[in-house]
Amino acid sequence: MKKRCLAMILCAALALSALTGCSGGTDATQASATSPGESNTGSQEQKPEGSSDKTVYRVLYSSEVETLNYLTSSSNVEHTIGANVIDTLIEYDSSGDMTPKPGMATEWSYDEATMTWTFKLREGMKWVDHTGAEIADVTAQDFVDAMKYVLTPSYDSGTAYIVFDTILNAQEYYDGQAGEADPIDFSEVGVKAVDEHTLQYTLKKGAPYFLSLMTYVCFMPAYGPLLEAQGASFATSADTMYYCGAYYISSFEPQVQMVYQKNTTNWDAEHVYIETIQRTYNAEADTIGAEMAKRGEIDFTNLGSDVVDSWMNDPATSDMVSMGRPSLDYSYFYCFNFNVKKLNENSYRDGMEGYSIDEKYEPANWELAVNNENFRQSIRHAINRVSTISVNTGDNIAPENFMENTITPKNFALNNGQDYTSQPAFADIMAKDSYDKDLAIQYKETAMTELAALGVTFPVKVLVRYNPSTTNWEEECVVLEQQLESVLGQDYIDVIVEAGPSSGFLGEVRRASNYMLLLCNWGADYADPETWTDPFYQAANGDGTYNRGSRYAYLAYAIEDNTASADTVKEYFRLVEAAKAITDDMDARFAAFAEAEAYLIDHALAVPYGVSVSDFVVSRLNVWEGQSASCGVSNLRYKGQKVYDHFISMEEYEAGLAAH
């Protein structure tokens, strides 16, 4: 297929995705018209032409999970597990229109006076073990117990901050348990099992996006007695967790295989069509996957941009190639690391000495450079995103289709029909590409004068890390190195591209503050612009320190260390806090968050990059049959999908696109 045709397909896909964005001001206090037990997958009830009775889905994977614990993990790879083995209170269907459908809850309501949400649970839902044997009924108390686990400091949940932000007394309970405040009883936290099938959440503030949080991992249930028995060992293996979702994990041997088996006790088992999902570990999956798919040994593989053209030009394989569904739930951006000191497991420096980055990369030199705004601006305007994104699109798709000038993707959030990125605060940012060689050199010249006066030595070493198991990331980093050094000169910067580990990359690189410039991503937790502040904003603790969480760039260290960027970071934090406080006027809320985000970008505290490039794939699954939403874990589910007797063609993909 020609480049122009594919570009038109992707443009149409992105335009249609505008329908999936939702406004935080939407009145979602009542459940949809879908009745309990009714299909949430539209026309999927009828067996599609070309689908088969094949019930086993085979796929390779090259990046192993660090845990199965959906209550503590903040990794998208690990959230895939929770998405498929644990159900949520609401669901979304395959249309992508963000209309909530009944899930474990059949109905829900909101009382504005008390800021309390009430959910009525289905009766007869079951917990099963790794053999599929029934253990107990799912009750409202399982949601309460799971939240208590999330709010237990020793378990170090990576998504607890979402609960802090929304649920009454959640932060206070956590801080009390951590010894950082007077302890309170968990009964004071805003989560309550009224009876076995009635669950209530009381909010700490107005949260117009709250219902969309219900498809996120920190609001999933877990069987209380098992949590109490296992403690920190919960979900460390297939037999140390129970399941209530579409599947259970029947077998898991790290770096060998993970097997999902259909949970026949699930309330919606009739719409779970794949019986067994066999995930086989292979460190070379990206290299060997294409040939294994061609031989019929696996049912899915990504196609790297280096082989797409040959496959599409070969009559024997051209009808085997399709694409992934365009996604707006992830945004990519470059982070500058504002802290290169060693951190403990909670991202504090207490008791830690030295640098998190090897001395050969001159981290002390970087500390001075990164806190100079002109230095950051020089890099921001020297990044040619067309070139780097082209590594993933090749000659088949226009890379501009995936570029974003803001952290929040276009069409993610709408308010009264107006896209968030059309806010006046973004006018200059949206008007043109940030890549500008002349401007980059102007910033360079000013930065060199200012930094030389501080004793900075040139070239400044810039350590760029990548995960070798991520397709094309190494090549993308090499292109980045070439373009930055070409524009700015090797007398100014020395970009050093280095691989991180293929497993545990986030823990050893980003969370360990072991990088200088890193391409990061963030997935929307809920349907509101506030979700895109989470990688950057850090709340003050009142003692001169800031809440750590999983914040990527460690911006608060600029304040704690009283660097040249301290006032800039303080102002960004102030703008976010002002926006978060607006809960009853969506026009004002959107405008305030846009002002904060524009400030972040204008001062080069982060550099927007783009949305996920839709991969070329060889797949027996039709991507348009799966659940779709712009936040939460719906997109990670296999529920509703069927294994076809052939690999989906581009023609079939286009038909699905037209229907959505």
Image: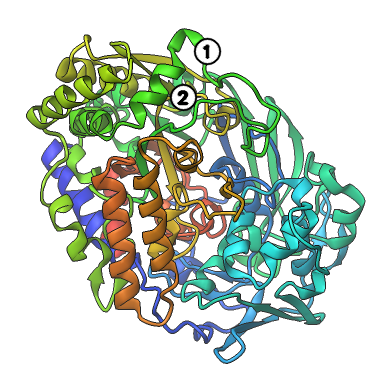
**Residue furthest left in the image:** 438
Residue at screen point 28% across, 52% down: 599
Is residue 365 visible in the rendered image? The answer is: yes
Q: Is residue 170 above or below residue 113?
A: above
Label 2 and label 1: CA atoms lie apart by 10 Å
The residue that disc 2 covers is 515
Is residue 40 visible in the rendered image? The answer is: no
Which quadrant of the rendered structure holds the N terminus?
Answer: top left
The residue that disc 1 covers is 358
Say what amino acid the circle numbered 1 marks. Asp
Q: Is residue 102 above or below residue 525?
A: below
Q: Is residue 528 above or below residue 160?
A: below
Left or right: 335 with respect to 494? Answer: right
Picture quadrant of residue 280: top right
Residue 635, image x, y percentages = 48, 54
Of residues 594 and 200, the one nearer the viewer is 594
Q: Residues within 10 Å of mark 2 (few under 14, many from 20)?
A: many
Left or right: 659 with respect to 105? Answer: left
**Does the CB distance between marks 2 and 1 fall below 8 Å?**
no
